[in-house]
């Protein structure tokens, strides 16, 4: 009796291995041969799931993005300071998140010259901004009709600012980790949220 193979799971496993290669050795390591060697399979299996290097890179990007989303959703609505906690999930505060940031940088370097991949990045940013906006609405009373909160346009503008801050901190932390320690990253987010709270109350 032939053994059942979960092809979706197998593809995800190969993509995860490819992601580890990019994170540790850069995009030049993303070849069918090196992925196959790391996965302990033949290049024919890798080529069965992925059409080319570009397809592999896109899969590693989506793998990292899915992990980031899972972290974000896991703390959404928790007690305490949900906006602070949610934004911290997006920062390179530990080895796993630093790995994801290296993957994103590899993808961005290619996407800057590839319209289809650039469109994928734009959509990821839009959805991330919308998620941050929803948390901001819940935490700071930014819903329509709340006289004490921000209006919807201002809410989205604030969400954009926060996402830009995350991207800036993440970029600097990746290249200068000795300066941008986890504590310094958290403080930068906390200071910005404190300023937003003051503006809202003022």
Image (cartoon, helix red, strand yellow):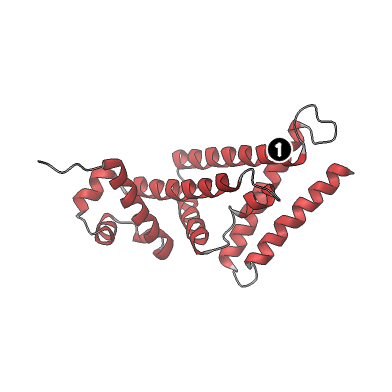
In the rendered image, the residue lying farthest to the right is 202
Residue 180 lies, in percent from the top left, at: 64, 67
- Camera-nearest residue between 141 and 49: 141
Place residue 143 in its image quadrant.
top right
**Which residue is disc 1 drawn over?**
138
Is residue 176 shown above or below 105? below
Q: Residue at x 27, y 44 (%)?
A: 49
Residue 163 lies, in percent from the top left, at: 65, 47
Left or right, 185 with respect to 109, comes to: right
Q: Residue at x 60, y 69 (%)?
A: 176
Q: Secondary structure at mark 1?
A: helix
Residue 159 lies, in percent from the top left, at: 69, 42
Residue 12 lies, in percent from the top left, at: 34, 47
In the rendered image, the residue lying farthest to the top is 145
Exactly how many numbered labels are in the figure? 1
- Camera-nearest residue between 116 and 47: 47
In the rendered image, the residue lying farthest to the front is 79
- Camera-nearest residue between 145 and 17: 145
Left or right, 22 with respect to 173, comes to: left
Is residue 78 shown above or below 173? above
Q: Residue at x 61, y 53 (%)?
A: 167
């Amino acid at each position: 009796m032939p053994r059942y193979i979960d092809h979706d799971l197998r593809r995800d496993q190969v993509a995860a291995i490819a992601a580890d290669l990019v994170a540790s050795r850069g995009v030049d390591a993303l070849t069918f041969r090196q992925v196959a060697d790391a996965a302990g399979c033949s290049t024919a299996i890798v080529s069965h799931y992925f059409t080319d290097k570009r397809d592999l890179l896109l899969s590693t990007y989506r793998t990292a993005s899915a992990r980031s989303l899972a972290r974000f959703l896991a703390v959404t609505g928790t007690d305490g300071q949900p906006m602070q906690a949610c934004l911290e999930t997006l920062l390179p505060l530990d080895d796993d998140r630093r790995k994801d940031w290296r993957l994103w940088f590899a993808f961005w370097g290619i996407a800057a010259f590839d319209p289809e991949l650039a469109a994928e990045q734009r959509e990821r940013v839009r959805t991330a901004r919308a998620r941050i906006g929803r948390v901001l609405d819940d935490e700071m009373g930014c819903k329509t009709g709340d006289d004490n909160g921000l209006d919807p346009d201002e809410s989205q503008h604030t969400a954009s600012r926060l996402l830009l801050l995350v991207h800036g901190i993440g970029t600097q932390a990746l290249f200068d980790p000795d300066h941008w320690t986890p504590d310094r990253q958290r403080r930068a987010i906390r200071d910005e949220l404190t300023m937003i709270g003051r503006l809202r109350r003022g």
